[in-house]
Amino acid sequence: MRDFSSRPRRRAARPVDLAVLAAGTAAFVLSGYTTTNAWNGRQRARARVEETRRESEAVQARVRELDARREPAQAIAYQALLTAEAPPPRVLADLVALMPGDVRLDAVSMTYGEPLGLRVEVVARTPSSYDLFLDRLQRSPLFTDVLPGEENRDGELRTSIQMTYRSPEGAPRPPAQRASEGSTPERAR
Amino acid sequence: MRRSRPRLFVALDAGSVSGGAGTRGGGGFRLASHARVPLGPGALAPSPFAPNVVRPGEVVDALRELARSLRIGAEPVCLLLPDGIARLALLDVPADVTPQQYARFRIVPGLPYPAEEAVIDVLPVGPGRAVVAAVRRSVIEGYEAVAEQAGLAQDRLDLTPLAALSGLLRHPGDAGGLMVDVVLGDAAFCLAAHQDGVLRALRNRRRDPGPDEPRRLAEEVQRTSVLAGDGAGPHVRVVGAGAGDLLASWRANGGTAEPGWRSEGAGAGVEPSELAWLGATD
């Protein structure tokens, strides 16, 4: 029926309207019941997801814990290996072998990890001696990552050097250098 | 279904407000009640754009008097708005769209007001064809406001020319040739040409009352007949305000027009053909 009203028309309810209303109400109730069921199902699913997530996080945390435990074990094993292959006397001997005669070591610290790190406090009588020592370190296959520290060139040259030591099995020792210098740990001290 | 329809109708037009209730039988309309309250000139001016209710107080008073005459209480009434406020068109509607949607595509862009202000409804006139009407919302609201102020409970709201055409097209007549129906309003009139149940042409014009109007209306009927493809003496029916006078004038000049609907039994003191809104009761 045509209706040009600017607002929705009011109309008396007819039996068919009441039937449609009843059907609509029933559909609404049914949809509400279905919605409630769906909502509860969703909540249960979310709870399961949350539980699974917590379990997953627990497993991951356990994995991380085991990884953390494995790392020191590896480090200890590697340290033991390095200690056997590169004992301090040998490392010190290799280092001293490269030192010119007017260079001495004031302190040496070794960190047995991967790789084996060295930090040495050096005193050189002349800068040229120090330069020669640095040059030998940088050319040596036993020492890598040579990093000179700040230098004090007033009078005696004092500085520190950081480097890493490579296992002699992977890098043959240069016997010629050792022979020509004739350095000993005792001299270095 | 019939019980669901409002039994009371209230029609507003430039010259009066009228209303009542009626039923249609095999021989014509039987008016259960009818009343008419004249309006002062200019109190209500049907227009597609401007506010129609020029003197609201006067229109409200007339509606209240009409309600008292018809003993309208809280029962909802169908409001019928006059000819001259809507853009009317006969459209061939594609199958994949509703008449309302198609009207928005075809008619609304040509309206002299924003599209969102257009209230559109249709009168289906067969498969794929519809008379569509677009009315400015503010115009409708003006009528609704005075009806509310008069204490009328509004059910639906229709246009008198569409209600009349609806009633006329449901009873296209026995004549086998072209039929031209004339629906008179106080401010405008409609001409609908149909044949074999198919509406072929629809025209909507403003009225220009005067001594010469019957002749001009006859010419408009002839133009409509030609527009519908048959200019050779169509059958003519007339309903609406002044239908009796127009028919008398035409008959006096040799015309053969007849009233759109007749009275069945004793009426309520008015000729049903004068009441275009009776088409809504059918």
Image (tube, coloured by chain):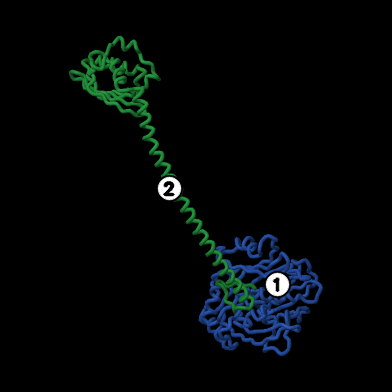
Can you tell which chain is drawn green?
A
What secondary structure is marked by label 1? strand
Residue at x-position 39% and y-position 32%: A74
Image coordinates for residue A63, horizontal then vertical, percent: 43, 42
**Residue that numbered label 1 is attached to:** B191
Q: Which one is in front, A1 or A50?
A: A50
Residue at x-position 66% and y-position 63%: B98
Extreme residue in the left direction: A155
Q: Which one is in front, B89 or A2?
A: A2
Q: Amino acid at mark 2?
A: Ala
Residue B82 visible in the current orientation? no
Q: Which one is in front, A38 or B166?
A: A38
What secondary structure is marked by label 2? helix
Q: Is residue B181 above or below residue A184?
A: below
**Residue that numbered label 2 is attached to:** A58
Image coordinates for residue B56, horizontal then vertical, percent: 52, 79
Q: Chain of mark 1?
A: B
Q: Chain of mark 2?
A: A
Q: Amino acid at mark 1?
A: Leu
